[in-house]
Amino acid sequence: MTRRFIVEPRGVADSWVKLAVPVASVVAALVLGAIFLAITGNSVIEVYAKMLKTAFGSWRGFSETLVSATPLILTGLAAAVAFKMLVWNIGGEGQLLIGAVLASGVAIMMGDNVPAVAAVVLVISAGAVGGALWAGIAAAPRVYLGTNEIITTLMLNFIAINLMNYLVFGSFSPWRDPDATQFPQGRPISDRARLPEFGELIPGLKSFLHRLDLGFVIAVVVAILIWVVLFRTPWGFGYRVAGDSAGAARYAGVKVSRTFFATFLMSGAAAGLAGGIMVAGVLGKMDPRSLELGLGFTGIIVAALARLNPVVVIPVAILLGALINSGPALQSIGVPSSTAVMLQGAILIFAVAGEFLIRNRIRRPDAVPTEVSEAEGATA
Amino acid sequence: MRGINKSFYGVKANDDVDFDLGVGEVHALLGENGAGKSTMCSVLAGLYRPDSGEILLDGEPVAFGSPKDALAAGVGMVYQHFRLVMNFTVAENLALGHPDVPTRLSEKDLVAKAHELGDRYDFPVDPNAYVWQLSVGQQQRVEILKLLYREARVLILDEPTAVLTPQEGEALFRTMRLMAEDGRSLIFVSHKLNEVKAVSDRVTVFRDGRVVGSADTVDATPKDLARMMVGRDLDLPKRSGSADRGAVVLSVRDLAVNDDRGLEGLRGVSIDIRQGEVVGIAGVAGNGQRELTHAIAGLRAPTAGTVELGGKDVTSRTVAHRIDAGLAYVPQSRLGVGLASGLTAEENLALKGYRKPPYAKGRLLDQDVFKSRGDKLIDDFDVRGVRPGLPVRLLSGGNLQKVLFAREVSQDHIVLMARSPTRGLDVGATEQVRNQILAERDAGIGVLLVSEDLDELLSLSDRILVFYEGKVVGEFSAEEATPEEIGLLMAGHTEEGAA
């Protein structure tokens, strides 16, 4: 029996590989999408051109792409921070929603009584706290009792969705907008608690960035901050050791459970912050239809494609933001908007499969062994 | 085997290797780690395909595409890491992958055959036992049984004694001799000279991927073989008198610690170690050594007793506190405990000190210090194979241990605790580690050395304590200790005790 191809681990993946594989996953997803579009009788070029034009073809389109990217940066961070530490938090969705619930709750409670800057800070922080608390519900039993956080975080998503809807649909809920007569809607929050748009701060930017608000800047700053914490602080070093091998971390004096817990809460806080920023920013209220877009789940795709690097999350989130942004425009040319969602899914599959190519290389068998005794290979 | 060449990543692991194995012969392969022994065996067993060269079996050229092909031709290998299914019984493991199961071979036949083979070669194994219930030595027997079952005529044993107690090792040698008398041929990989002398008929020495020589074992003196192996005369490190003993730096009082199953793993042990003293702990693995070192390091809370470092009670203090109090610790598992396998050598060298200056500067880490200190230690300790960004798991065992030692002895410390520090290392690396331990002692460090290698304990320790079932069952000074006495105590005074 001869093997036709042989797989072996790479020692150090070249940086071009680390870049090429994610790019190739996106391209492969687009090719797969093209095949699907062609089979369903659509013009591939027309659809992709339309998407590109919608997402990046105009200042309005581009600013909308960034608006869509803002929560994705944060949910992407939520997943990246967690997964690197082997915290399988897939509850970003629920944490985002609870963040929105708490943020809007705080905003509604404050009314017009708190000065603008403080109000915004409080509302956004409430979002982060909400997300962290929701993550904590899964984190505590995980750390102390060893429950499976994949199951608990996933289930908590559904509780969060229904809780949010309950708060909007419930007749006596303070979250419900008393003026929304046709369909229940979240109560609008005070303008003082709203994140300012770029156009409001610098009038000249209005015609370029339209309704993009400071939430985008906050998300970018948080991403950079998290990168610094993870890669440039003692805590982050302990975090990386614990994520690599818990045994070594314990041996080196890292408090592994505590680090795990903190990571879990940090992850939830990032997702909750996304909810808070949406409420204080573009939405201005807890609007279930605009919050339940699966942004928490899309964050997992962002994290995977960014290879869990907090800074790389930013461009990847913009890319996926473009997809989300361009989806609805496809309807105008008679293509279902879910095409964009399908592409997202395809990108995730290729990105995860591509990870294998980053870690391993595939060769013809003549030159290279099957199971390299790694030690032997790397010495000398 | 003729003219075998095999390269990994462009490094020649086997360079034009010729090797002959006679029928009914026990042929030892001797050489340092990475000398090419395991590579040649893996080629022979069909795991690797040679880049060039040929294998002749009974004069016929053969080409094995996989271990399955090799086994079908009667060539099988027992790997250092066993390939057994823990949740299966011995018989089920034997059945696994056997072509005659279940059509032509029933479970009853399997069990009967297992008994028969066990009797014939004097290594009884209960075929109905689950593998996880067996000791490492018994698991190894199952691996050998698997090969005998498939009628292997050539058996390759890759460092089989590394995991065995001395008694188990001798039992294995008996079995090997019996198999050889039965007309089977055995290849025995080792880097222990005395074992090679004890069991083999012929010996072939490897160095740097080449065969440097073959000889009948009776004609070869240990000194010659050692010289061939390392390419120079070997100085076995020897204690030179005793260093000045100072104050007690590590004191363990009536320590009791539970093992992973919640049973008493360590039962009321007291040890004092002074400055400039090496205290050796002898014992078969699993007699409380792990619990002792874990409790001292702070990885496991004792149920009773105290641990004092430098005169201060640290029994309830954290791991980090003990590191700061001067505990250096070389654990048995290099990867996964001593070193974070996915991190680089530089990062691993900072593993203990990263919380404090110079690594930490204010709230941030100083990347330049990581690099400069890392480079210096890598240089000082002659760590080879390091490349920027390379995860340490891709370094060889000897180099891993250098990284680990470099970190532990370069920090401020008063006690060095080491478990099996030379396990799996080649002669050169072993020598370096042993010299380092003696240098530590001479520098006034208190050393706690836990090892299963009696020769090592005897050559390095000032005092030896023997552990059996979580208790100290004997204490010897360096002068009065003999391997025989210690071996008996390790085995709990009975032959069976060791298994």
Image (cartoon, coloured by chain):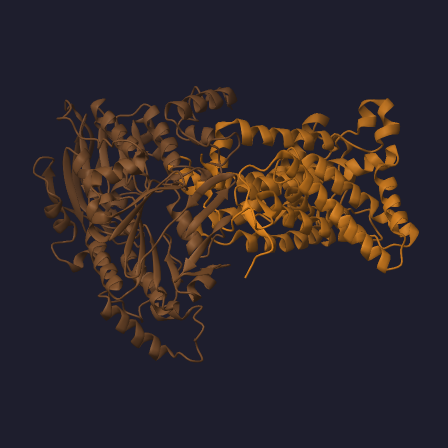
Q: Which one of the lettered chains is coloured orange? A: A
Q: Nearer the viewer, residue A267 or A42?
A: A42
Q: Nearer the viewer, residue A96 or A338?
A: A338
- Horizontal arrangement in the rendering, residue A290 relative to residue A131 (left or right): right
Which residue: 86% across, 56% down?
A38
Q: Residue furthest front?
A: B59
Q: Is residue A136 above or below residue A194?
A: below
- Horizontal arrangement in the rendering, residue A376 relative to residue A115 (left or right): left
Q: Is residue A24 visible to us here? A: yes
Q: Position of residue B122 (x, y in %)?
A: 22, 66
Q: Position of residue B371 (x, y in %)?
A: 49, 23
Q: Is residue B466 above or below residue B315?
A: below
Q: Position of residue B251 (x, y in %)?
A: 19, 33
Q: Is residue B297 visible to us here? A: no
Chain B shade: brown
Q: Position of residue B297 (x, y in %)?
A: 30, 37
- State which quadrant residue A256 falls in: top left
